[in-house]
């Protein structure tokens, strides 16, 4: 397996990875309606992360495609793909604000093999090098166990009201970065 920065050419493969991950790994956490609505309105590629070189993919060295993707951001946006973002996404101040952990997705057949932890380690190291002392994220319910295992603490649990009337439960989580 090989970890590298995502490229624009990866977007079609990322879209497939995200859809498969959400549909399969959300079972037991979200209804099928919530998963599909989330894919339509929230879950997707954030091209700003790719442009910022802070979104990573893990690919199968045998040519099997993308196994996982995830990133971090020095920008204010907490979650969501291009389909839900506005045009303004200002930079955070590393002295007073936490970097964002963003958009972790794993291929269902590659789940629970340490890929999320590997992506997190890369993201945390990059955020630390950029001067950030903390991390913040909005986790999906399937992601909460991973983030807890990575040392994140629960902030608030709430639901995002989607345009089609579907309510998507999420959780805001925080973690300090070790120096």
Image (cartoon, rainbow, N blue to C red):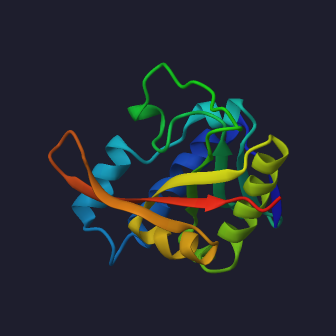
Please tell me whether residue 21 is drawn above or below residue 114 in the rendered image.
Answer: above
Please tell me how many numbered marks the rendered image carries.
0
Give coordinates of residue 23: x percent, y percent: 39, 64
Residue farthest toward the top in the current orientation of the protein = 87
Tell me the residue at 61%/30% (across/down). 48
Residue 46, quarter of picture: top right
Whether residue 74 sits left or right of residue 155 in the image: it is: right
Tell me the residue at 73%/38% (across/down). 7
Front position in the image: 164 or 178: 178
Please tell me whether residue 107 is drawn above or below residue 75 in the rendered image.
Answer: below
Quadrant that contains the C terminus: bottom right
Tell me the residue at 21%/39% (across/down). 163
Front position in the image: 117 or 33: 117
Please tell me whether residue 133 is drawn above or below residue 144 in the rendered image.
Answer: above
Quadrant that contains the N terminus: bottom right
Please tell me whether residue 159 is drawn above or below residue 88 in the rendered image.
Answer: below
Residue farthest toward the left in the current orientation of the protein = 165
Give coordinates of residue 90: x percent, y percent: 57, 24
Give coordinates of residue 15: x percent, y percent: 52, 47
Give coordinates of residue 92: x percent, y percent: 63, 32
Front position in the image: 12 or 73: 73
Tell me the residue at 33%/51% (across/down). 38
């Amino acid at each position: 397996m090989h970890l590298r920065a995502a490229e624009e050419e990866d977007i079609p493969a990322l879209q497939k990875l995200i859809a498969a991950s959400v549909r399969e790994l959300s079972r037991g956490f979200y209804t099928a309606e919530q998963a599909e609505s989330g894919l339509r309105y929230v879950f997707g590629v954030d091209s700003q992360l790719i442009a910022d070189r802070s979104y990573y993919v893990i690919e199968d060295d045998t040519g099997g495609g993308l196994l996982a993707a995830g990133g971090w951001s020095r920008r204010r946006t907490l979650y969501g793909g291009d389909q839900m973002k506005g045009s303004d996404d200002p930079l955070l101040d590393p002295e007073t604000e936490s970097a964002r952990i963003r958009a972790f997705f794993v291929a269902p057949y590659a789940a629970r093999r340490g890929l999320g932890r590997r992506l997190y380690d890369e993201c945390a190291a990059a955020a630390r090098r950029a001067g950030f002392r903390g991390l913040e994220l909005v986790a999906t319910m399937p992601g909460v166990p991973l983030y807890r295992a990575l040392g994140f603490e629960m902030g608030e649990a709430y639901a995002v009201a989607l345009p089609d009337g579907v309510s998507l439960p999420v959780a805001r989580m925080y973690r300090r970065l070790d120096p």
